[in-house]
Every structure is written in structure tokens, then in C-alpha cells.
Image: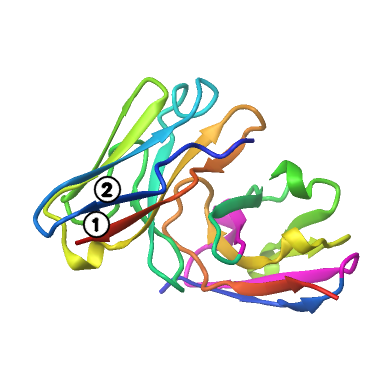
Amino acid sequence: EVQLVESGGGLVQPGGSLRLSCAASGFVFDGYWMSWVRQAPGKGLEWVANIKQDGTKTHYVDAVKDRFTISRDNAKNSLYLQMSSLRGDDTAVYFCVRGTGSAVYWGQGTLVTVSS
Amino acid sequence: QSALTQPPSASGSPGQSVTISCTGTSSDVGGYDYVSWYQQHPGKAPKLMIYEVNKRPSGVPDRFSGSKSGNTASLTVSGLQAEDEADYYCNSYTDSNDFYVFGTGTKVTVL
């Protein structure tokens, strides 16, 4: 069974940093692109970043470029999102997603709240 | 990276059909057959309903169908059921940044 379990969310002050993790199981992790998608409270979905199987290619939405970094550790079957210079509009549930674009498997999400 | 445009709401009675539009540009919806649709119930993760314009993942009822004409994609839900009440998001590859973009979302209400 495919499982994606996010962790690392919480309350952080504006300008602060946070690292999200996603533990993957039930599939060959290094065989798939992986992505992060976020959803602000009461708002729509937004692709945040994705990363190629071997980590050599990444893409970001303009709103997080130069502030967020997506990475992966295939030996640990884990996906990460390092977030810095956090702002109020980064407040959202962050979903770990297997694949990119058309994705069947999603985690349940972890809430990041940016507030003083 | 502007979001694709969807109507905020749509509704229909049980058994009826509802169609949701998703309008983009030639850089996304109109230029590529990488349009997908997601269903999301409150507090849940999105569920893939349609991919590559009109293909259904295993387990998705054939009441759900997708199509595309020019820069506009559409999702049709036939034979509406109570459990179809949810938010629906379209999604497309975009060559503006070699990434993906969601639509603004449509709340479907079953009357």
C-alpha cells in the first residue's frame, strides 16, 4: 500500500524557517517524480515544487523561488521542503504528492501557520 | 503562472448532469493534452478523477468524463449523486515555467 506521511508543520514567526518531511512507503521511491502542493485555508490548490527521480531537476512556483528548496533522499525514501523567509501567505496545508501533474497518491497534509 | 479560470459554483439535482469549464491559454490547456481534474471533499486530500484530458484512473466511475476544445477543458459529471458534492479543480502543464497550474476551483452542489 502506498503511503505518504508528512511531518514538520507547525507555528512559525514571519521571517522564520521550517523543514517539512515526507516519509514514503509501498512503492519504489526513486522511480517517481515527487511534488509538494499547498492549500491556504479556504483557498484553492497550488503546486509548490517538484523534483525529478534522481534530484537533478526541480521546478518551483514563482511565489516561493529563492525561499524554498525541495530535495529528496532516495536511500531514506524521503522527500523534503526547506522553507525560509516565511510569510503570512505561506500559511497552508502542505501535501506530499507522488508524481507531478496527474497524481493518484497524496499524503494527508501538514499545516504550516506563519504568524507572530 | 496565473491560475486557470473555473466558475466558482455549479449545481444539479440527483440524476442530472453538470459540466465544469476550465479556461487557460495556448501555453497550457490549449497547447498540451496534460489536463487533469481533481475532486476534493472537505478536510480531505484531492482525488484524481481525470488525466490527460479524458482518461479515468482505475476505480473512477464512468459518470465522470473529460474533454477539451481550444483553450478550454471541461469535466462532465453525469447521473449526479450525493457523494459527488465536492470541490473540483482542473490542472494543466504550462510551458511558461515547465511546471503545472491548477484552476481556481468549482464547488459542485447536489440539490
Give percent across and percent down for residue B63. Answer: 16, 51
Which residue occupies 26% across, 56% down? B58
Q: Nearer the viewer, residue A38 or A78?
A: A38
Q: Is residue B60 above or below residue A11?
A: above
Q: Amino acid at mark 1?
A: Val
Q: Is residue A18 above or below residue B101?
A: below
- Magenta segment boundaries in residue numbering: A14-40
Indicate the chain on which mark 2 is placed.
B
Give the quadrant of the C terminus of chain B: bottom left
Q: Residue furthest left?
A: B15
Which residue occupies 86% across, 47% down? A66
Give percent across and percent down for residue A7. Answer: 67, 78
Residue occupied by mark 2: B56
Residue occupied by mark 1: B60
Pointer 1 with pointer 2, Cβ within 8 A: yes
Query: Would you identify the image quadrant in which residue B48 lies?
Result: bottom left
Q: Amino acid at mark 2?
A: Arg
Q: CA distance from mark 1 to mark 2?
A: 6 Å
Instruction: Assign a secondary structure to mark 2.
Output: loop
